Each structure stands twice: as C-alpha cells, then as structure tokens.
Amino acid sequence: MELPMLAGGTVRERADAARNRRKVLDAAARLFAERGIDSVSMDDVAAAAGVGKGTLYRRFGDRSGLAAALLDEREVELQDRMLFGPPPLGPGAPPAERLAAFTAAYLTYVDAHLDLVSHSQTASPGARLRTGSHRFWRLHCRVMLTDAGVADPEIRADMLLGALTAEQVRHWRRDEHRPLAALVESTAAAARHLARP
C-alpha cells in the first residue's frame, strides 16, 4: 500500500507571499523558542516578521495554525525518511523493525518539538486525531502491523500512537525525568511486541 505524503506536492505561490510566509515562520519559531508558545501573541509574531496582522490571520488563522505550519516542514522530512530512506525506517526491513524504527524516530521528533506538537494536538478536543500528519502516522503503523500479520492492526496502531502523544512524552521527560535514549529503547521494544502475531 502506498502512503500519501502530507504536503501533497509543491504549491506555487507568489514570490512576495512566499517571502512573507518564510518571515512569519522564522519569526514564530524564534519567538516560540525564546518565550514558549503560550507567551507569544499573533501580534508579537506579526511585529517580529514585519507583516500586517491581517496577512498573518488570513494565512495562519491562529497560533495553532502557526504551530501546524512550523511542524509541516519537519513532518515532511520524517515522512521522506519513512518512504524513501534506508531501512529500518525506510523500506526493506521486516515490518516489526520498521515499526520499531518509526516509534524511535517519532518519539525523537515529538521530544524535539514538544511544545509545538502539544499545542497542535490540544488546540481543540480531538485535534490530534484530525491532522493529516496523524492520519499518515496511523496509516503507516497500520500497514506495518497488517504486514506483520497481527489481529486488529487499527487498534494496535492507535494504542502505539496514543502512547506517544505530546502529553505523555512531556510527562515522561519533564515530570519523571526519563532519558530520551531509554524511552526510545523501551517504546521501540513495545512496538516490536505489538507487531507479534
């Protein structure tokens, strides 16, 4: 089964619109990193980017839209590695090993962008489940679990992704102070276990 790419191809935009988009995303990334996403207003981003507030709101809607746009680029990089990269994350490894490699890569991605991922997952009830990226991750897990021959691959995919939410990763990393390497090892082992028929 072929997995769809999140971005769905390149969208052409005017050069000035592309420059403004890049300025906004760079300003938002910088401000979010400096102050935390909850301490940055859309007005702050517009001022730092040197664009009008109307432009910002039309293009991104709100901070959740900004967070999603910032994450899109990073998610596409991970998707490329999953679809075209070397095994075990990319094609060519047994399904259980690909699932374990995805789990390790996805956990590392969530940890690296924890505040942005958290904001995008909790912007509204069920927000995490409605994103294109979540559908992509879920389909990938389901395909790997189906290829591994397990019963209920959809349920197992949901269990795995439910354990890797930003809220759970935040709890492990910031409340329990678990090292990332140990979490990667444990969650990859859990993924291998879920892939057993």
Image (cartoon, helix red, strand yellow):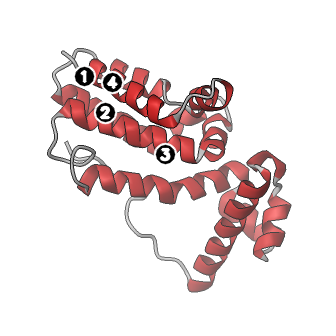
Q: Nearer the viewer, mark 1 or mark 4?
A: 4
**What's the residue at 23%, 43% (across, down)?**
88
Q: Residues within 10 Å of mark 1 (few under 14, many from 20)?
A: many
What is the quadrant of residue 114 in the picture? Answer: top right
Q: CA distance from mark 1 to mark 3?
A: 22 Å
Q: Which residue is mark 2?
A: 100
**What's the residue at 43%, 41% (across, down)?**
106
Q: Which residue is mark 4?
A: 189
Please, what is the three-letter code of the amino acid marked with disc 3? Answer: Tyr
Image location (x, y in percent) of residue 171: 63, 26
Which tag, 3 or 4, sits closer to the chain's start? 3
| Circle 2/circle 1 CB separation < 8 Å | yes
Q: Nearer the viewer, mark 2 or mark 1?
A: 2
Please, what is the three-letter code of the amino acid marked with disc 4? Answer: Ala
Q: CA distance from mark 3 to mark 2?
A: 14 Å
Q: Which residue is mark 3?
A: 109
Image location (x, y in percent) of residue 33: 71, 56
| Circle 3/circle 4 CB separation < 8 Å | no
Q: Secondary structure at mark 1?
A: loop
Q: CA distance from mark 1 to mark 4?
A: 10 Å
Which tag, 2 or 1, sits closer to the chain's start? 2
Q: Is residue 62 left or right of residue 139?
A: right
Q: Residues within 10 Å of mark 3 (few under 14, many from 20)?
A: some
Q: Is residue 121 left or right of residue 154?
A: right
Q: Secondary structure at mark 4?
A: helix
